[in-house]
Image (cartoon, rainbow, N blue to C red):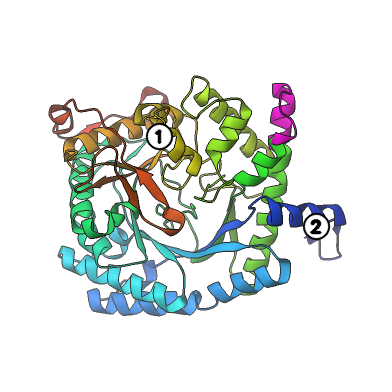
Amino acid sequence: MHVNNECEVIVVITLNEVLETNEMISKMNLDVRTITMGISLLDCIGADVDETCTNIYNKITTLAKNLVKTGNDITKDYGIPIVNKRISVTPIALVGGSVCKTTEDFVKIAKTLDRAAHEVGVNFLGGYSAIVSKSMTAADKLLIESIPQALSETELVCSSVNCGSTKTGLNMDAVRLIGEIVKKTADVTADRDAIGCAKFVVFCNAPDDNPFMAGAFHGVTEGDCVINVGVSGPGVVKTALESVKGESFEVLCETIKKTAFKITRVGQLVAQEASKRLSVPFGIIDLSLAPTPAIGDSVADILQLIGLERVGAPGTTAALALLNDQVKKGGIMASSYVGGLSGAFIPVSEDQGMIDAVNVGSLTIEKLEAMTCVCSVGLDMIAIPGDTSASTISGIIADEMAIGMINQKTTAVRIIPVPGKEVGDKIVLGGLLGEAPIMPVNKYDCSEFVSREGRIPAPIHSFKN
């Protein structure tokens, strides 16, 4: 590293790093999972919903017009695969709060977002969202109630709701409503294996700068426009661990840390290039290990390489905690601005190793819930029987939100009750969304609990002022 006369820090990439990166890309499934442009829509609010939609479309298509081309150009210039180019926007409940009087008004904005996303060529746009961790405004409730229609009538729009935080507690009125919304979303997209639910996630402690879908939104703490990059690399970590089989925990941890550092360095390079070429400030690197359905690109495989016969065996939560912590420790040394979720994702449908573990009976929803205490997110891309009640879904969401609230971490639920499907069946969503076996759900009732009104108070350790 050296410093030029203008005090700009220039990172010198060595030949050895170049060779290592080439090998990680060609043999180990390394990719940059997403370049996500965050765009504030607060200045798009017009006199009515039509003017607001016009402003939204114009701003997105202006700022993001070169996003996809820039990503493709970086891939050509550096040989680094950039799988997705995406957009996140200000939570639409805030943008539409003064102009949307009906659910149809919000759906009109959703369709505008979808049209803009198609125009600029991104694969997803996130931010059809509401932040209701303490209570709901009338606009928040309207947006949440519009989600089934919005997701069924758009292709690229993703939606999220943050319904709890360590500081505010859990908004159980929102949790109860969201259970019903998940069921309705499944019903209106039943002909596509309830794919609408795959584009909807419920959060506790949602970060403002997450570049990953379906939960990405551009938080109000962000500037007008920013570039966030999400890296991946389970295959790289798996390959590295194959060389240290049987070694001590110290060697295991050092290997994961060093590998995470190398992966994040690639993301840092891409982020800086994208920021410079688009003339948009660089935000954060999200250094999550995000699996894909591809063989060898699996977090489950890493956990099994650490020493588990199958994911779900005793020791699984400890192994995941080790992996998550070492990924963070290694990655944070490679970039000054690490954010988003950052760690290890454990989606079922998007990870072949997780699918295999479910199919042989070693992995259950209850064990996944325990694992979410130490992973990046939570219960992700889990397909359940279509006859599961809305109250049971709300109960599952409440359990996961409580883990996030008490442990001061982000947790989330992306669950798919598939109409007409039962345990033993599977769904096929395609692409990065993959396929998933239908997992059994506890049959005992929790409706009396979730039907109580109000919120669960914040925990005692939230008082730190």
Amino acid type, callout 1: Val
Q: Which residue is mark 1?
A: 358
Q: Is residue 409 left or right of residue 142?
A: right
Q: Classify residue 229 by image quadrant.
A: bottom right
Amino acid type, callout 2: Val
Q: Which residue is mark 2?
A: 18
Label number found at residue 327? none
242 up-or-down from 366: above or below: below
Q: Earlier in the sequence, mark 1 or mark 2?
A: 2
Residue 94 pos. (x, y %): 31, 60
Of 416 and 439, nearer the camera is 439
Q: Is residue 96 left or right of residue 241?
A: left
Give the residues drawn in magenta, as a range.
242-256
Residue 332 pos. (x, y %): 66, 42
Q: Is residue 321 left or right of residue 114?
A: right
Residue 18 pos. (x, y %): 80, 57
Q: Is residue 304 something that shows in the picture?
A: yes
Question: Can residue 17 be found in the magenta stretch?
Answer: no
Seen at 66% across and 70% down, the residue is: 74
Disc number lying in front (1 or 2): 1
Seen at 61% across and 25% down, the residue is: 307
How would you rate the neighbour count of disc 1 (Cα within 10 Å): few for under 14, some for 14-19, many for 20 or more? many
Q: Quadrant of the N terminus?
A: bottom right
